[in-house]
Amino acid sequence: MDWSSVLTGAIEQGIGPSAIIYCLAAIGLNIHFGYTGLLNFGQAAFMMVGGYALGSLIQTWGWPLFPSLVVGLLMAVVLALVLGVPTLRLRADYLAIATIAAAEAIRQVLGSAALNDEFGGQDGRYGFVDGMRSLNFVPSGGVHFLGLDFRSYDFFIMIVGWTLALLLCGFVFLLMRSPWGRVLKSIREDEDAVRSLGKNVYSYKMQALVLGGVIGALAGIMSGLATSNVAPSDFATDTTFFTYTVLLIGGAARVFGPVAGALIFWFFISGLDLFFDKMTSGADPSIPASIMSDDQASLMRLIFLGLILMLIMIYRPQGIFGDRRELAIDAH
Amino acid sequence: MRLRTAALLSIVVGTLMMGLMSPAQAANDAIDVNGQLSDTRTDPAKPVAGVKISVEKDGAEIATGTSGPDGSFSIALPGTPIDLLGEQITVKIDTDTLPKGAELRDPKKTSYKLTIKTDSDIRIGYAIGPATDNSVGLFTEIGQSGINGIFLGLLLALAALGLSLVFGTTGLTNFAHGELITFGALAAFMFQDQWGWTFFPAAIVAVILSGAFGLANDRLLWKPLRGKGTGLIAMMIVSIGLSIFLRNIYQYFFGADNHQYTGVAAGKLWNIGSIGISPKAFYIAVVCVVILVVVSLAVQRTRLGKATRAVSDNPALAASSGIDVDRVITTIWIVGGALAGLSGIMWGLTNGFDYQVGNKILLLVFAAVTLGGLGTIWGTMAGSIIVGLLVEMSSIILPSELKYVTALVVLVLILLVRPQGLLGRAERVG
């Protein structure tokens, strides 16, 4: 059995486009949850408006790439304002339920058959990446090194995506050292204390929601560009939960937490997937089909994912690289 | 595996036979626009012959045809199907050639724009004369959705009580509550599927098992975490992990198929006026009402019920006045698990179920609980009925695919006005 292919496959996925998407989404979520303590369970909705603005403006209305991209980011600002007004005054658990409900409502509306002409129903929008492909400078043969293989366009997306992720990390680093960032962190630690110092907590929370939401929209846009498809199923509630897992693995309230989390999460998840796929495939599989069929093998990674999320939250809530003193999740 | 092969074979054979039976299609590979003109002013409808129909592309006429004595027409479009894909065409009907006094039922259809999406023929039906009235009156529709809404609300109340009780006593927002619901549905199904039990014993044992499963949830996970002093938000995220874990375990053992219970007669629809009620749904509603009343009475009257309310109100004070908080919480988990399991079975009876039935309705359950005010029993029941009514009533105005959306939007809006929920106790929340 060829185990090196499991390893290289896992590394390819670990640094590949899907890791980038979750890394970006988690950087946004880090501003919400890690730094401000906002329990936003609707990050998938920010990704969705970004991705859908891009997909539908290009495919349905024939816009060029860059204006649609800008509109996608603006849509996230609008969503943050609309979502923030009713929910930001709520207690953490109510905020979680309200945002998760709003995200699901948006997903069902955008995926509805009634709006099929605009947003393509359950199939979503697709084939809108010609503008992005024309910018591709990676040789068309793809890139091969150290036994890893990437297709040309994928590698291009990876360069763009990781550059973006590193720039955003730098931005978050500077932001959180600034007085503005310190206010956010103190809101997370003790909202009332901040209020008593005369700061407008509501307004700071709103700014954090907008900023993190725009970065979330960027993740949705990258998702659309990487797969040349946006569909309602890409932005389900589980997408938000996976983003939380990525963030918590790396460590919330850490600048590089999302990056580390995304790399580890995708390496581990794809490694598991490839491993169980190998174990159950072939004429004489290592695990008999009566115990695990190949359909069942594809579920193993999600079973492990659930376990990891539970274990990390119970035994190491600050994540792998986090600082326990930095993050008091239950400060209020 | 053998079944799958048979299914595949039948599809192949079926496709072949359909191909054989439609020689017209086999004869030309161009895309045809065909259809039928019929005059519904008479009964039976009369075919309309001699009507001229033309097809235009980019403003230029590319093909024409005339309806035959049976009212049908067939116009072959020039060009191969590949070239035509994605093109927009306009099918026009020459209204002068229609019989005197006749008009299309849908006047917009005289010039009908469409985009060619597949390489199959395009069929257009033209009806002439007023529509035959088969829509139901508005009042009937309101009555019917009202009844359906109350039935749905009762089911939701059953599912939501456990969540609300657990939140009230321990403060845990349990995102794995949906999996407690699914557990009941799957357990009952397993007894039927594996050991061929009839429905009622299977359901009763499944409800008992669900109670035990609720207890196991608490003993193996939540109680140790409470002891460890894990925060509420951390526990909420743990519950998300548990939900993903359990849901995929369920799928591992039960597959992704939709299941039905056997041996439960649906019965003949009762008609009260123009409103139809399924006896099965009615009996389910009766069971829900009985259980909700019993639970309410228990919470209101019994010692344990009073202790539960005391713990919900203030756990520290309850403990210091001699209430065994741990025992209350244990009971809540057993009762909550059993109620959730029962609601899963009931839901499965009405709508069928799969490995994620609980997860699918979890947001509705959350909406119901939050609407009423997290942790209050009366609020939960009221919230459930409101959500049930909203979901069903909304389909009078909105497309039915969006019926859950209404409930979710109303949830967010109500939180805007009353952050503590409809019956929750007001407190400063920011």
Image (cartoon, rainbow, N blue to C red):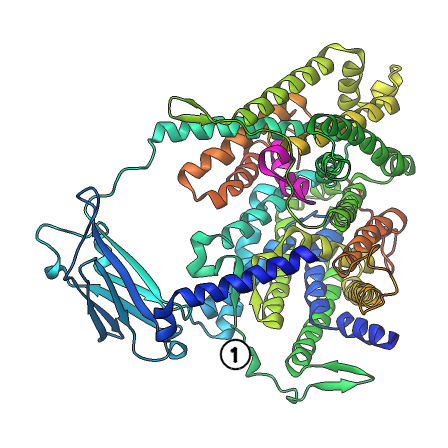
Please state, as top left, top right, bottom left or bottom right, where the C terminus of chain B lies in the image.
top right
Task: Confirm whether residue A210 shows in the render.
Answer: no
Residue sitting at 82 percent across and 57 percent down?
A: A292
Q: Is residue B42 above or below residue A74?
A: above
Magenta residues, as a range?
A: B348-368
The answer to whether B126 appears left or right of A4 in the picture is left
Q: Residue at x 49, y 64 (%)?
A: B15
The residue marked by circle 1 belongs to what chain? A
Viewed as shown, does residue A123 lie left or right of B156?
A: left
Where is residue B320 shown, x and y percent of the image?
88, 18
Quadrant assignment, res A285: bottom right
> Where does label 1 land, which residue?
A131
Give left or right: position of A73 versus B378. Answer: left
Q: Secondary structure at mark 1?
A: helix
Direction left: furthest residue: B100
Membership of B352 in magenta stretch: yes
Where residue B368 appears, as percent x and y from the top left, is: 61, 32
Magenta region, mostly helix, strand or loop? helix
Place of residue A203 in the rendered image (x, y in percent of width and height, measured from the top left): 61, 48
Asked if B372 appears above or below B51 in the picture, the reply is above
For residue A231, what is the image quadrant? Answer: bottom right
The image position of residue B426, as x and y in percent, is: 64, 26
Q: Is residue B345 left or right of residue A10?
A: left
Q: Nearer the viewer, residue A53 or A232?
A: A232
At label 1, counting other C-alpha atoms closer than 10 Å, the crowd grade (few under 14, some 14-19, many 20 or more) is: few
Can residue B98 be seen here? The reply is yes
- Residue type, numbered disc 1: Gly
Magenta stretch encompasses residue A33: no
State the residue in front, A207 or B173: B173
